[in-house]
Image (tube, rainbow, N blue to C red):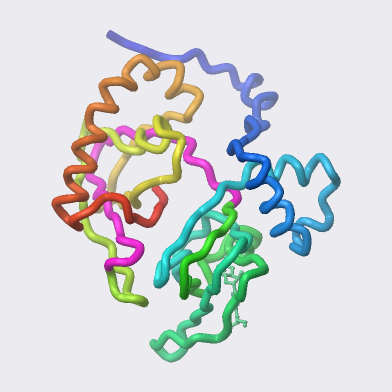
């Protein structure tokens, strides 16, 4: 069977506004978020409606001591506003990580990589239990490997040493296999990073087409999710404790 979508280039031009992202919040959460964002300089230029849209899109992230929120050199994903907790800032100098400062219970970080499309300029590590509000990056694609191979890597938030938060290979996908469905089906952040192993070609299906074409297959995909959990438990002894990553 051949299955295809009609392509209308004109439609593409009109259809470039992303649907609004809303992470539902209780009244209490919304108030806490508003308080945390009151003095954030980046938000000062937004009008009432724009600010409301941004607050809608933010999601709460609870963090544990020694958890890496950002690793220097990584690609940017989210921008964070601090709700509570202390966060140490490390920068690499002559091959060593040097603590250059900290955020104490207020402020925001992670804007540089997103604004300038550069790698993360510092490592940010929680030094105690805390809470952050994250903004933005949303999983929006599903992938099928056409040729070559990808490896799926994951790192524990807390299991690895404080500064060498190493990734562990979880699985590989080759021709005909797919990845990237978990976040689309569960509506959560990416749970792992996926890297090409040599030259690799993937088919990319955006979330709208995924819903339309593969929506009926979701239940079949969900069956694999328990296998993912089993793999995590086998590797790390638990599956609750993993840093969200990107594809
Ligand atoms: P990012 O997206 O690059 C790391 O991800 C974040 O750490 C960065 O955005 C800033 O929000 C935050 N130099 C660079 N980034 C810093 C610094 C910093 N401090 C916080 N961030 N320096 C420390 C200044 C006390 C300069 C070090 C030489």
Picture residue at 62% right of the left edge, 25% below the top: 12
Residue 1 location, quadrant:
top left
Q: In the image, is 58 to the left or to the right of 154?
A: right
Work out whether residue 56 can be spotted: yes
Residue 152: horizontal and vertical position, in percent?
A: 26, 49
Position above or below: 106 against 224: below
Check if residue 138 falls in the magenta segment.
Answer: yes
Picture residue at 59% right of the left edge, 59% below the top: 80
Residue 241: horizontal and vertical position, in percent?
A: 33, 55
Please tell me in which quarter of the rendered image ligand 1 is found.
bottom right
Position above or below: 39 against 140: below
Picture residue at 28% right of the left edge, 33% below the top: 178
Residue 22: horizontal and vertical position, in percent?
A: 62, 35
Q: In the image, is 202 to the left or to the right of 7?
A: left
Residue 212 location, quadrant:
top left
Would you say the magenta stretch is mainly helix, strand or loop? strand
Q: In the image, is 205 to the left or to the right of 42?
A: left
Residue 23 location, quadrant:
top right
Picture residue at 57% right of the left edge, 53% below the top: 134
Report the magenta residues as a range: 135-159
Residue 127: horizontal and vertical position, in percent?
A: 46, 75
Position above or below: 2 against 174: above
């Amino acid at each position: 069977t051949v299955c295809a979508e009609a392509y209308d280039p004109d439609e593409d031009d009109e259809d470039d506004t992303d649907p609004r992202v809303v992470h539902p919040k209780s009244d209490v959460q919304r108030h806490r978020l508003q308080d945390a964002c009151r003095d954030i300089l980046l938000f000062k230029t937004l009008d009432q409606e724009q600010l409301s849209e941004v607050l809608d899109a933010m999601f709460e992230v609870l963090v544990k001591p020694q958890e890496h929120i950002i690793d220097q050199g990584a690609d940017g994903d989210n921008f964070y506003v601090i709700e509570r907790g202390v966060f140490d800032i490390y920068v690499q100098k002559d091959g060593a990580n040097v603590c250059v400062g900290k955020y104490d219970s207020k402020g925001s970080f992670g804007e540089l990589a997103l604004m300038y499309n550069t790698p993360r300029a510092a490592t940010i590590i929680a030094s105690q239990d805390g809470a952050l509000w994250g903004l933005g990056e949303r999983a929006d694609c599903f992938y099928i490997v056409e040729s070559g191979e990808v490896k799926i890597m994951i790192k524990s938030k807390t299991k690895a040493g404080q500064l060498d938060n190493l990734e562990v290979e979880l699985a590989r996908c080759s021709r005909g296999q797919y990845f990237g469905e978990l976040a689309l089906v569960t509506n959560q952040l990416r749970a792992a990073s996926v890297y090409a192993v040599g030259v690799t070609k993937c088919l990319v299906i955006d979330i709208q087409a995924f819903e339309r074409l593969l929506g009926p297959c979701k239940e079949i995909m969900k069956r694999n999710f328990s296998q993912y959990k089993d793999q995590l438990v086998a590797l790390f002894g638990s599956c609750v404790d993993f840093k969200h990553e990107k594809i």
